[in-house]
Amino acid sequence: MTALAARRLEVRFGRARAVDGVELEIGSGEIVALVGESGCGKTTLARALLGLVKPTAGSVEHLSRPLGYARREMRGFRRRVQLVLQDPTGSLNPRHTVYEAVAEGLRIHGIHDREEERVADALAKAGMRPPERFFLRYPHELSGGQRQRVVIAGALVLEPSVLVADEPVSSLDASVRGEILALLLRLRDQLGLSVLVVTHDLGLAWNIADRVAVMYLGRIVESGATADVLLNPRHPYTKALLSVVPEVSRMAPVVLRGETPDPSRIPAGCRFRPRCPLYASGLPAEVAARCETEPLPVLPAELGHHAACHALTP
Amino acid sequence: MSLLELKGLSVTYAGNVPAVRGVDLSVAPGEVLGIAGESGCGKSTITSAVLRLLPKSAKVGGQVLLDGEDVYGMSFGRLRAMRWAEASIVFQGALHSLNAVQTIGKQIAEPILLHEKVSRQAAERRVGELLEQVGLPARRAKDYPHQLSGGQRQRVMIALALACRPRLVIADEPTTALDVMVQAQVLDLLSGLVRELGLALIMISHDLSVLGAVCDRVAVMYAGQIVEEGPAKDIFDDSRHPYSAALAGAFPRVGDELFRYAPRGLPGDPPYPSDLPSGCAFHPRCPVALDRCAETEVSLADLGEGRSSACLRACEEDLDLRGAS
Ligand SMILES: Nc1ncnc2c1ncn2[C@@H]1O[C@H](COP(=O)(O)OP(=O)(O)OP(=O)(O)O)[C@@H](O)[C@H]1O
Ligand SMILES: Nc1ncnc2c1ncn2[C@@H]1O[C@H](COP(=O)(O)OP(=O)(O)OP(=O)(O)O)[C@@H](O)[C@H]1O
Ligand code: SF4
Ligand code: SF4
Ligand SMILES: [Mg+2]
Ligand SMILES: [Mg+2]
């Protein structure tokens, strides 16, 4: 059963095609990592999956049914699919206690029964034990890792089935990263939670994800089981990304020039061509011609290892 | 001959906060030294101490020698000249500190005009050269900060640090806010500058994997002290201190089965400087601590082959520093 899916999803901001036709599925109890450079559209796709931005085309599916944007439907959906943001310091109000921070979601959703019990339960699930000891603490009295746990407890209190975590550890010290990632794994194992982690850190994907989807300029260019994508990358972009991970010293680094190009000016043909090392190194004329003129296909969401590149599909 | 030498440097902030406690370090021209450690271990404090930028209330002990000259014995005039022309800093988080209403060209030209007796045209020419050196077209001098991406702004910060041709550059977390590809670009740039200009570079980062990729030597700090120092690759692949081992282990190596579905970290928090544990300051979090670790003062000991470690158990063969658990 798919917990959450994007179907030919598009999000445009004026002329910018931030998300430009994406098929993606997050199975129930599955951890999927969405990776790619800054500006490639990861957060926009995540926000669309959360119902926070309405797609300009395509749709979001929740439990295999198209998501409706009417108020009542949204309300139920927002409980089931929760967001965890990057910077715990920014997402916690410094004047709210831990208890208030976690209870906020319940109050917004009009859930008034057993409040204290629910808050304690969520904190305990997030690894803050015994929870009562943390109720009256303020964010500045917590470590970075504990703050991020409070943010996660704030999401868990609504008993969601899906978590969307946007760079959940990138602002944390190396030493506390591990405990937060271990927590996400444990929540999946114990509660059967589905998780979409948005990140530019491939090591994180290797650490916890079952599947990886690589995004470039609004499209998924490669997807598959984590070991397939990260150990046998097929797309030249995935290969370049992997080669610059500092700890992967066995590959010669392919440092791509320039930064993610502008989504309001997506190149014709293959959108990666202006930076593609494979194209630059010289391809047979008929393949090169396709790189220049033929847009890449939208990859299917089905399981299996897929890559969108003309050099791979003669 | 080292360009910068710290001898027993200590810094105590007002309120009896010993943020740096007896640090010895040196860096030579053409060399890249990395400093690693968790938030609050004293990395930026060292940076500020080198250029005498600490608040007046902070007490500084030991010596900072720049080309053999004691920075704390310099007159203010000499100090001002030294700050740009001999040593400069790419400050932590400076990405956001560029002046929003001035072109980047003007901002880079400012220290040149202030410190070198050159015409405005000559300064502008130099700005163009500097921008190209950091991989930006000279015409971007006319841009305002908001017209640049994060990676481009970090390049501008590096150009600014190079403005008066210093021989020592300290880069404090230069890639932390950047994504992998842009981070690789900035690291490439910095290594290139070291090679071409013979700079001495000190790279500060909490990310040991970044330092492992570009540094010649790395010093790992914990609670204001260096706990391990040695060739970058050794520190990352074959740590001789449980703390460095934990830091190195916190970065998953793609492809290494040990890390698959097994994120690792280091439980607990680093101590606050005014409330340090007795003995080895790391003992409350150390997975292989012995009883005597809480009682014995530990200091950096030479292990040979350019390596040193401050751990009572550093010399034990076959010790699994990550703990058996
Ligand atoms: N509200 C908006 N209005 C206009 N453009 C937007 C808006 N939100 C995002 N964009 C643009 O859409 C593109 C994708 O942005 P998005 O934030 O999704 O990227 P990202 O992959 O999450 O990047 P990062 O890793 O830096 O967080 C960018 O070019 C961005 O400038
Ligand atoms: N002006 C100050 N007054 C008092 N204490 C200070 C001052 N500046 C820093 N400290 C303390 O000194 C210690 C070292 O701080 P420093 O900024 O050097 O750490 P850091 O290693 O650079 O950390 P980060 O990785 O977060 O940048 C910290 O405990 C900090 O709270
Ligand atoms: S389609 Fe062509 S340009 Fe695009 S990634 Fe493949 S080889 Fe490179
Ligand atoms: S001295 Fe003891 S507590 Fe300190 S790092 Fe070594 S084994 Fe651990
Ligand atoms: Mg984002
Ligand atoms: Mg710092």
Image: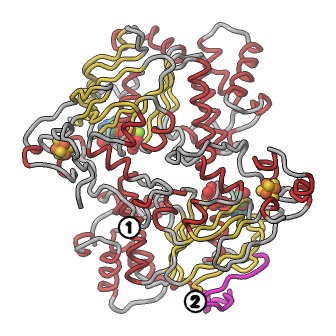
Mark 1 and mark 2: Cα distance apart in space: 24 Å
Q: Which mark is residue A182?
A: 1
When asked about the image quadrant of residue A94, the answer is bottom left
Q: Earlier in the sequence, mark 1 or mark 2?
A: 2
When the figure is inspected, residue B177 is found, relative to residue B196, above or below; the finding is below
When asked about the image quadrant of residue B220, the answer is top left
Three-letter amino acid code at disc 2?
A: Met
Q: Which SS class for mark 2?
A: loop
Residue B50: x and y in percent read 39, 22
Q: Quadrant of the C terminus of chain A?
A: bottom right
When the figure is inspected, residue A77 is found, relative to residue B159, above or below; the finding is below
Q: Chain of mark 2?
A: A
When the figure is inspected, residue B218 is found, relative to residue B109, above or below; the finding is below
Q: Which residue is mark 2?
A: A1
| Residue shown at 70% from the left, 55% from the top | A237
Q: Chain of mark 1?
A: A
- Part of the protein shown in magenta: A55-74
Q: Is residue B36 left or right of residue A16?
A: left
Q: Is residue A65 magenta?
A: yes
Dot 1, how many residues are within 10 Å of its Cα: few (below 14), some (14-19), or many (20+)? some
